[in-house]
Image: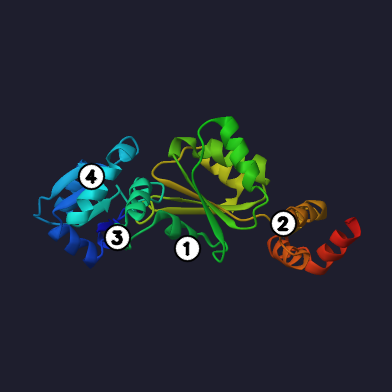
Amino acid sequence: MIILAGTPIGNLGDASRRLVEVLTEATTIAAEDTRTTQRLLAALGIDNRPRLIPLHDHNEKRVAAELVELARDEDLLVLSDAGMPTVSDPGYGLVAAAAAAGVEVTAIPGPSAVLTALAVSGLPTDRFSFEGFVARKPGERARAFAAVAEDPRTLVFFEAPTRTAQTLADMATAFGGGRRAVVARELTKLHEQVVRGSLDELAAWAAGGVRGEVVIVVAGADPREIPLEDALARVAALVGQGTRLKDATREVAQSTGHPSRTLYDAALAAR
């Protein structure tokens, strides 16, 4: 089978007992960076010297089929540099290929920068959307932000420290400078820092420079920010896809804050 294992995102003390056990017994490991895996083994005091196979963004498509066949005969441990494989890290293509080939895939859960940042943010956690790394090109970034500007869910992004200030300024433009947000950097490490404020405040703070690994958590759109006509357009789109009007108005009401009865009556009047 294929075993996806979560590794520490900073503090080695977060390595689970199951992770240590499987690293001690592994014969073959597919690793995002084999040097990082070697350092992890040494840091955890593990003497095992398994076969290490690179698995990264540049070779995953090429080696996935070979690794799936290997996993038919032995357990293949998959590691990213930090956190859970496949979450903004290599492994998705491998898992998809394994699922298609009928090869079993399991996981040893471990630390996640996404969930850790969300948990300490102080922003709503009942519904959230992980948006991955922010696009580097200004045009692509602007389009990506525009697509989620009215999303009521809490948004989680990864960003490089050198681009954090510009990204926060762009978020303030796209989402509104008063939108609540959090910058969590160096999570679980010695210099962990969680900074909360409005996007305008955080952009000003980051202008002085940011170091370390960064996660940005942004509050979802206030339902009151979504005009009634936009909510009705969503209702119409759902109805056009075959959803009953009553169900469509109920669904849109939950995501926009407009009363379902108001939406229902307005949709009927517009017919």
Callout 3, which amino acid? Glu
Whether residue 190 is visible, yes or no, is no
Callout 1, which amino acid? Ala
Callout 4, which amino acid? Thr
Q: x%, y% of residue 16?
A: 25, 65
Instruction: Using the image as rendered, state which of residue 57 and residue 194 is in the foreground.
Output: 57
> Is tag 1's residue or tag 2's residue first in the polypeptide sequence?
1
Q: Secondary structure at mark 2?
A: helix
Asked if the residue at tag 2 contacts the one at tag 1, i.e. Cβ–Cβ closer than 8 Å, the answer is: no
Q: Quadrant of the C terminus?
A: bottom right
Q: x%, y% of residue 245?
A: 77, 64
Question: Which residue corresponds to mark 2?
Answer: 238
> Is tag 4's residue or tag 3's residue first in the polypeptide sequence?
4
Instruction: Using the image as rendered, state which of residue 146 and residue 97 is in the foreground.
Output: 97
Label 3, label 2: how many angstroms apart (C-alpha)?
A: 37 Å
Q: Is residue 142 above or below residue 179?
A: above
Question: Which residue corresponds to mark 1?
Answer: 119
Q: Quadrant of residue 122?
A: bottom right
Label 1, label 4: how many angstroms apart (C-alpha)?
A: 27 Å
Question: Which residue corresponds to mark 4?
Answer: 36
Question: Which residue corresponds to mark 3?
Answer: 104
Query: Residue at the location (47% across, 37% down)?
Result: 209
